[in-house]
Image (cartoon, helix red, strand yellow):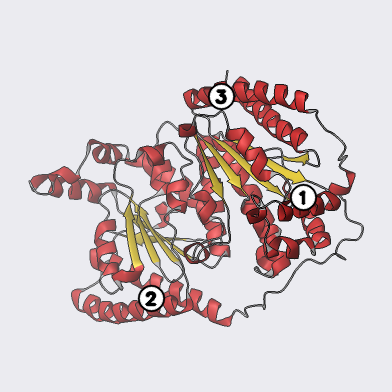
Amino acid sequence: MLDKVDLNVTLDKETFKTKKKTYVNQIAALQRKAKTLGIPILIIFEGWDASGKGTLINKLTVPLDPRNLAVYSSRRQLSDDELKRHFLWRYWTRIPEQGQIVILDEGYYSEVISDLTMTGNERRHRYREINEFEKMLADSGVIVVKFFIHISKKEQKARFKKLMKNPSTRWRVTEKDLAQNINYKNFKKEMDFGLELTDSESAHWHVIEGGDKRFATIKMMDILAAELSRGIEKRENTVVPENKPLISAQDDPYRTSVLSGVDMSPSLSPEEYKSELKKYQKRLRILEYELYRKRVPVIIGFEGWDAGGKGGAIKRLCQNLDPRGYMVHPTASPSKEELAHHWLWRFWKNIPKQGHIAIFDRTWYGRVMVEPIEGFCSAEEYNRAFSEINTFERQMSEYGAVVLKFWMNITKDEQEARFNARMENPDKQWKITDEDWRNREKWDQYEVAVDRMLLKTSTENAPWIVVEGNDKLYARVKVIKSVVEAIEKKLKSLK
């Protein structure tokens, strides 16, 4: 790709001034329009060191409203939180919300290109995850614009020399920068490789000839104006469907029913429960320290029927753990801030650091259960969510995390008995709400949704564990035993 670029193009001063004024006004107007429509915009600047990325970003930000703009640079020391999480975490946590522009001054591409320890397969794997990330953003309505600023080896060397002559800019040239110029040919080959693998339908690359700063500025502004115009036109011409319930009890009459085949009879005596719980809690405490020592993250998600025993299982799971090593994240209806981002944003924010445990009391699966039944998402969003969930969990697993998902299953009669028991106990009345009774009326709809969910998202990376929950004692032990066995299996694979 880069070999085909003519780096000798220039633009005269008068043409530059005229065109710049036009584009500045146009881009400012497009930003206001995007803000009104609630369109998020992600702009990525990559390229050679000293190619002028910073200058172009400065030129771009002048016409923009800074209240709806954030610029992030990767040319800094990564924090402990960043180093100990999946590399995409620091980008997921910075994605634009509706109506906002986020500019990345270098980012995940530079990380891959500059890491000389990566093998070819590791690079391909990283680029695949980048493509998946950008596709999720684009599918959700984010305008993703990617610029690669290209200069020749000779031009880069001349710019380094100029910077180093000036005492006030000498610090900007590092040994790493100089090494890039010395190894220009090899870096160019790797850059071409990355551009080729990540030039996707969701986010195309735009190569900017960076030798002449006036030409580079105008070309960047022209492309950005065109991309924003296309994105805005697409949004304006999109017919927003009326969100309505997408699942009924009559759907899939011949579906493979997972829940109906579950034997709900298993139980434990109080004595067995006490003995088994103590054994596995003790073992889990030891494993928690091993996880920390081996830097293995653990993600545990709980879903299930209302009153299915999620809270009781989580309480026993955490009872003997070091509280510094785990965090429980209760998932409620999304906040205004969460609704302004991609729907997975609030879960990516809470993925654990290496060696830590994250427990989700209700999870990202609300997207394929509650939302389609209550009419909170479109059919397109619902159908797309299954692959997005599988991608998310696969990325976590391939990163090295233990991913566990529990469906706490109880019968409809058992749920009614538990609801009534809560109503009669003053100390537990807070646990039962009108919404619980209303959800119960939709039991058959939820059963359709859950069967579909279990079949489509039980993968090798993250299989569903259905817990027979009519007997609370049995359910609690099965959960903690399953967690122990999964962690032991993971640690054994690392030896």
Residue lying furthest top in this view?
A: 495
Who is closer to the viewer here, 265 or 359? 265
Residue 235, given in percent of the width and then of the height, sits at: 54, 77
Real-space Cα separation, disc 2 to disc 3, in angstroms: 52 Å
Quadrant where the image shows the C terminus: top right
Q: Nearer the viewer, mark 2 or mark 3?
A: 3
Q: CA distance from mark 2 to mark 1?
A: 53 Å
Q: Which residue is mark 1?
A: 418
Q: What residue appears at the point 71 percent right and 65 percent down from the top-left corner?
A: 372
Q: Residue at x 70, y 42 (%)?
A: 406
Question: Considering only order in the chain, which callout, 3 or 1, is on the residue closer to the N terminus?
Answer: 3
**Tag 3, which secondary structure?**
helix
Does residue 325 lie above or below 148 as drawn?
above
Mark 2 or mark 1, earlier in chain: 2
Which amino acid, mark 3?
A: Arg
Badge 2 marks a residue whose secondary structure is: helix
> Can you see residue 383?
no
Question: Label 3, on which residue?
Answer: 285
Answer left or right for 285 relative to 242: left
Who is closer to the viewer here, 229 or 390?
390
For this rendering, which residue is in front, 330 or 416?
416
The label shown at residue 31 is 2
Ranked by sequence position, the earlier of labels 2 and 3 is: 2
Disc 1 crowd rating (10 Å Cα; few below 14, some 14-19, many 20+) is some
Give the residue type that dot 1 points to: Arg
Q: Quadrant of residue 18?
A: bottom left
How many marks do you count on the picture?
Answer: 3
Q: Residue at x 61, y 47 (%)?
A: 361
Can you tell which of label 2 and label 1 is closer to the viewer?
A: 1
Quadrant occupied by the N terminus? bottom left
Residue 428's mark? none
